[in-house]
Image (cartoon, rainbow, N blue to C red):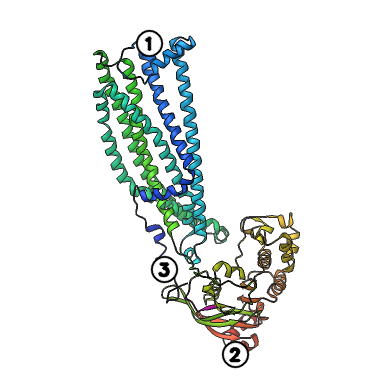
Amino acid sequence: MSEATGTNLNRNPDQKMFDDDLSGAVLNFQLLRRLMYWLKPYRIGLIASTLLVLIASFAAVIMEIMISRVLVDYIIVGETDSLMPDLGMIEATRWVEQHTGLAPLLSAGLLFFVVMVISTLAGHWHRLTLTAAIVKGLRDLRQDLFSHMETRPSSFYDRVPVGRIMTRVTNDIEALFEMLRGMGSLIGEFVPFFVALVVMFSASVKLTLILLAMVPVVMLTTFFFRRASREVFRQVRNSVSSLNQDLQENLSGIQVVQLSGRQQRNLEKYTSLNKENRRQEYRSINLSTLYGAFNDSLTGIGLGLIIWFGAGEVISAEMTIGGVILFTRFMSMLFTPIVTLGEQLNVLFRAMASGERIFQALDWDEQIHEPADPVQLPERVRGRIEFRHVSFQYQSGEPILKDVSFTVEPGEKLAIVGPTGSGKSTMIRLLGRFYDFPDGMIFLDGIDVNRIASHDLRTRVGVVLQDFHIFSGTILDNIVLGDPGITRERAIEAAKTVNAHGFISRLPAGYDTPLQERGANLSQGQRQLLAFARVLAADPEILVLDEATASIDTETEQLIQDGMRKLTAERTAILIAHRLQTIQEADRILVLQDGRVIEYGTHQELLALGGLYKTLHELQFQEV
């Protein structure tokens, strides 16, 4: 239950913080720990992937030893007494010779082939199991994020652009996938690193130390790259979010854009946002390219050092030729993990920003407050509605409703009229509890609606809006809306009752006709009749018709008026309309102005009163 004393319980700060309140931490271990919650159910796959990458990595080291120590030293040079480690591969080659009768070169080739197959298959299965576990975990995260955002109240979406939500559900989740996949790959890079390091120290301590002296240089470069990249990648994510927001707004309102000839102006705005995104992307690319070029140059320097110092040790018989070759092969294993780690920082920075945005959305706790012990409504409510001194404001200092009081008796039809911005639609939003407000203001059958679970309340209030939303699917899908209690027969009967069956029957597939996006293949009147059928099929006790006959031709309006009469029969109904001819049959009419009730009575009583209602009536019905 609410505890506020004001008229609006929005406890959260301005939704601008939905983008701004981010720490920008490069490596947020708390974020990684939370991410593990979604990966934990698939830990068996992650463990299997880790074991497979260990096998693949060790096999990769063995193949390098086969080339240098077995092929060069043992087979070509004939060196068998060297103290350089071969991890038992020379002895394994001899064993193959003895048991197969093959020549040493063929035996080494056969053994190399077996190790290569093991490395390839283990690496392939590692990637499959790793990707499967990550995809499943992020699938669950995306579903939880979607479910969470569906339960945010209207006050949240009044101020947060939908495009920014879409970015979190799509682009930001994808950034986490790239990060997790990269972290899994790093394991496969660092296992050969440590194995190679042990072998290199066994071969030549001096040459190994010379190469290791370059590692701090790479690490220092990585540190400066991280500092320079931190803010860049946050700006990249924000610029992508702005692009998505602008694109979503333009495509959603494409008809208005084309009708008003705003294509060029909108293109200029999108181009400006796109240029900003390109500028930020260039900054990130330049940093990454510079970092990669520097690391490539270090690899060349390392190769030169191996040839220079290694040749001297071969001449002094301190190292074999195969040992020098082994160092050149192992050098990539020594530096590649560090280079890869630096490249992964690019992905890591993006993912940290994305993860922070995702969990910020998941932690955004603004919601309609539900009663701790909700009242259980009877199977059918009577439908008596009472507004008792209701005051409300969306933003502090800007009141929308001011001390509004009225009562709608069961089965009564109340019409609400008034100028645009007078608060008509706000009253309907409060009746459906889409916003929080203090207790003791709105009652259903004498029960404070704040004591009723919002889902239970909304099943009793059917709303038909002027801007009726069509979902992807068929005509029948848009009537039933996935409610298992509404059968096909019940949906068809509802459509017949509100005069929608006629136009539906003329469609190519009838009730199974697929609808285009937002019902573009239906007229405004057909969409309105479909809205009536949807509400009637749900069978609510209270109906709210918000501008239900706006922008309708005369012939269709007659069908809609007849459908409205059938729809509101024996139900409590609230009718909101600018066109007064649609509400003259209402039992009573409430006139709002600037959020206050200024007139209340029947049609004839309000005309006799000679106030705002009579003025509106005369303006609409005056003879030309």
Instruction: Tell me the element at label 3.
Output: loop
Q: Residue at x 40, y 40 (%)?
A: 183
Residue 97 placement (x, y as % from top left) = 45, 11
* Quadrant in which residue 104 is drawn: top left
Q: Which residue is mark 1?
A: 76
Q: What is the three-letter code of the residue carrying label 3?
A: Arg
Query: Mark 2 to mark 1: distance in Å?
Result: 114 Å
Q: Are marks 3 and 2 in contact (CB under 8 Å)?
A: no
Residue 438 in the magenta stretch? The answer is yes
- Which kind of residue does numbered mark 2 sit on? Leu
Q: Which residue is mark 3?
A: 11
Question: Mark 2, mark 1: which one is toward the viewer?
Answer: 1
The numbered disc on residue 609 is 2
Q: How many marks?
A: 3
Amino acid at pointer 1: Ile
300 vs 153, left or right, is left
- Magenta part of the chain: 437-442
Which secondary structure type mostly characterizes the magenta part of the structure?
loop
Percent across and percent down for residue 20 are: 38, 58
Of pointers 3 and 2, the one earlier in the residue sequence:
3
User: Can you tell which quarter of the image residue 497 is in?
Assistant: bottom right
330 lies above or below 624: above
Instruction: State the separation of the CA atoms marked 3 and 2.
Output: 43 Å
